[in-house]
Amino acid sequence: MEGPLTRALAEQLNELVTGKPLERILVPEGRWQANMLLLNCVGQVIQRVRSHGKWLFFDFSHGVTWLCQLITRSKWEVVSATEAAGFARRAKRRPLLTVYLRNPGGGPPFAAVLSGRPIFYIVPTAKVWSHPDISAMGPDPLATATFHDVFPYRLRQHPQRTIAAALLDQETVAGLGNMLKCEILYATRLWPGVKVASLLASQIDFLAGTVVGIVATAATFASKNQTFPWRVYDRAGLPCGICGGEIAVDRRGGDNHLTWYCPACQTLGKEPLLFEETEQGRS
């Protein structure tokens, strides 16, 4: 789940579960080992749910934080207590975690259900940013006021990397996935295989602003449960909205992912070939 979707989920969960006391926590026997920190969260209150990059943070009133990254088809759902009980009775793929909450306003009890195989940690809130998986994260364009200062420094740490690979590195910028990577490269007209070392300072500044703008737009669409209007991602063979040329897809980004791009528009940083390829030259 990319950063904008994670942010939208954090805002939704924050609205639904903040301030609601936890009545009980169910963990299926034999699937996941509940420790004392988890059990000690019963009776406590979630003060806020926030995000950074692809991570969710559940901050509790007694100084404990749950860290969760949704991977491998994992998800959080807020359902009625009756629905949650039905999930728990399933023979296969029972929820990893079912958190029953009390509604202080007198409404019916409900539950937050975590299913799939997420990454999940329980740590003291004061030590969240000391956790290895969290401390290494780069700036989040949705949350970090100093993004324009930190991002260029992080980007320059690996000058021989391609820009496509750098944008997918969570230590360079938190929350980007392959879909947003393609859209950002398209918006900046950068060739996917351009090396970081060859970028000018002005190009990096423009890239930083583009990252912030596209991620913020994607977050707005996610918060409204609307599909982002992809201009290049997953549009191989379709006409480019700028030049009308055919959008291509291959692994020129050198990041072990497919990259969708416009060969005609995205030429910044592209090294000229000694001999231009033709259909006859390849045959």
Image (cartoon, rainbow, N blue to C red):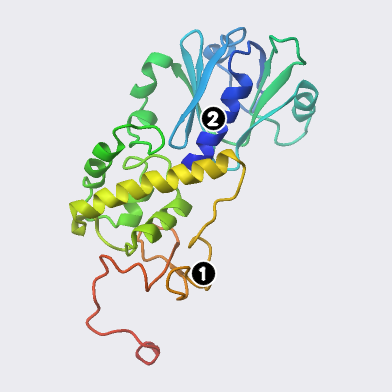
**x then y, percent, for residue 230:** 52, 57
Q: Amino acid at mark 2?
A: Ala
x, y percent for residue 27 = 65, 22
Numbered circles on residues, count: 2
How dense is the environment of label 2, judged by Cα within 10 Å: few (below 14), some, or many (20 and up)? many
Residue at image position (57%, 11%) is 45
Q: Quadrant of residue 21?
A: top right
Dot 2 falls on a residue whose secondary structure is: helix
Does residue 1 appear in the picture of this structure? no
Q: Is residue 128 left or right of residue 273?
A: right
Residue furthest out toward the front: 242
Residue indicated by mark 2: 10
| Horizontal side of residue 7 vs 269, given as left or right | right
Q: CA distance from mark 1 to mark 2?
A: 32 Å
Depth check: 21 or 134 in front? Answer: 21
Furthest toward the bottom, the residue is 280
Q: Which residue is mark 1?
A: 236
Percent x, y of residue 154: 25, 42
Which amino acid, mark 1?
Answer: Ala
Depth check: give the residue in front, 161 or 216.
216
Residue at 57% across / 33% down in the picture?
Answer: 9
Q: In the image, residue 118 lies at what x, y percent?
A: 55, 34
Residue 267 is drawn in which quadrant? Answer: bottom left
First-in-chain label (1 vs 2)? 2
- Which of the pair 154/214 is nearer the observer? 214
Circle number at residue 73:
none
Residue 242, picture quadrant: bottom left
